[in-house]
Image (tube, grey):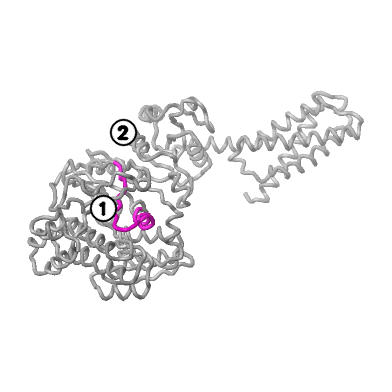
Amino acid sequence: MGYKQRISLLMLIDSLIVLVSVVFSYWLLSPTLYLAPAVVGISSVTLFIGHHIFAHVFKLYKRVWQYASINELLSITTAVSLSIMTLAFVQLLSFQTVYSRTLLVTWMLHILLIGASRFSWRLYRDTKMQSDKNKKRTLIIGAGNGGTLVARQLLNSGTSELYPVAFVDDDVTKRDLTIMGIQVIGNTKDIEKVVVEKNIEHIIIAIPSLIKCELNDIFSKCAVTKVKTQIMPSVEDIMSGRVSVNAIRDVQVEDLLGRAPVKLDNKKIADYLTGKTILVTGAGGSIGSEVCRQVAKFHPKAIILLGHGENSIYSIDMELSTITDGIVIKPEIADVQDKQRIQTLIEKYEPDVVYHAAAHKHVPLMEKNPHEAVKNNVIGTKNVAEAADEAGVTAFVMVSTDKAVNPTSVMGATKRIAEMLVQHMDMISETKFVAVRFGNVLGSRGSVIPLFKKQIEAGGPITVTHPDMTRYFMTIPEASRLVIQAGAIAKGGETFVLDMGEPVKIVDLAKNLIRLSGLTEEDIPIQFTGMRPGEKLFEELLSENEVHSEQIYPMIYRGKTPPVNVNVLYDLIEKSHHLDKGELKDLVLDIAHFKTKYLTQLSLVE
């Protein structure tokens, strides 16, 4: 039905209701007046005109009545009451009296019939939805603003496959209340019982203020039921504008990591990024590209995207070009191992800040290719750091890893040596050089999560190296924020570390992913394959001699390692290409641990 036809139909219905209300009330209470055409006629015409005027004033013809609520009832009552008051005034002028009893009955009958004509649309819609056997019976966890919003969205959506039948909420004051016809029938401890009793086929967690450990607890209760569980966005996502408040989505493993997200000191960061030229190495990688996205929010003058992979640099270039306005984006294909090329680019753009994210990070692959690890992670860092120093860059921030602490792998050892180089550069340069360590990054290239997901899609098994293998985890945005914040608060020479909460067992992560897929360990078994070369059971973020107990920033700690004679270190690294794999691995691990004959030499600072 078209818009004009709909209004015409409503006006016709209302006109009939006005006539019926006036005639019936006079016939019922004032039969003598009912026989007086003047009284009935003037009353009918007056009420007819008054009703349509106030109906337009209160937009009774423009409301979507299938979603009618208490607000619509109040509008009907107000419009009808004003119409009756107008009629009373006309009667007083015309007949020097007001037929109050008849007007009272007319008023009540008018409201009753108008309300019934409108709410019948809502009743028809709700009855139709309840009788739709294709809709999934849905439990909403949280009966606050978030839960109410979700319930209204589901009730008002004719296309949704979900229908809300119950709330659960831990607030005892809401117990047994009814919200939009849906009862609050228990708390989160009752989830499994409610699912059985109400034949629940779908669950929505609708508490956007939940911190991750609380969400993990609730999701664990939902997972026991084996019912598909979704979640409404977090407060952070809603406030940032990344998603709308009604964007229901699947629970992700990132949601279940029990740590509050890192919050930025936006003012301090803006002071050192806004209007500046920023260069990011490894800009096409997981961390580098996210650093670029985060930096762009602070309106720098330019962002230089430096990377070796043309496809990844092209991708982030295209993305930033569409979301940034007034920021110069310059993609540059270059290898950090090419010293001359790096010097040329840094001299050309004269960046104020360099974020050095380019590195080889895959532990088993670097065990097999130690020469490439040294060339990229050590020599590449040396090239970028020295070029930054020569160009007078204000701050140089190197992305490091927890595997650099007491390293057992070539990758970890080369990153530790790169930290030594950065700390030495801070001692001899006007540029502030710092390193930032964090644990495993969810969703990054080489992350265990994509591997586990592929294994689940293939029907299993999920392969885990050891049942006691634990790691620190964080999300890509969190890691990138730490990198940016470190540059803003750096004084020079520090190694910054995020308070990453408790380490997570890899096997528990695998179990969470299985549950998130709606499966059980019977469906997807977990197979232990044994530790790979270079791996450690447990990771550390700072060694004992690096720890500074004070927290220099919310959730950020500072460590500082002993200084080294990097001239000796440079000499050793330059000879590395003459060594075979085994010799080179032993060399970099000895250097990283200050072992053997290098201990005295490395501890001497010129």
Report which residue position mark 1 lands on.
560
Q: In this view, does 248 lie above or below 144?
A: below
- Is 107 on the left or on the right of 507, as rendered? right
The spot of residue 16 in percent (x, y) is 74, 38
Label 2 vs 1, first from the N-terminus: 2
Q: Is residue 398 above or below residue 59?
A: below
- At 22% from the left and 38% from the top, the residue drawn is 522
Q: Give residue 28's quadrant in the image.
A: top right
Callout in the foreground (2, 1): 1
Q: Give residue 591's quadrant in the image.
A: bottom left
The spot of residue 181 in percent (x, y) is 53, 31
Q: Which of 92 and 509 is in front in this view?
A: 509
Q: Is residue 294 visible?
A: yes
The spot of residue 339 in percent (x, y) is 25, 73
Residue farthest along the front direction in this orientation: 606
Residue 102's disc is: none
Report which residue position mark 2 lands on.
224
- At 68% from the left and 38% from the top, the residue drawn is 75
Distance between the alpha carbons at the discs numbered 2 and 1: 46 Å
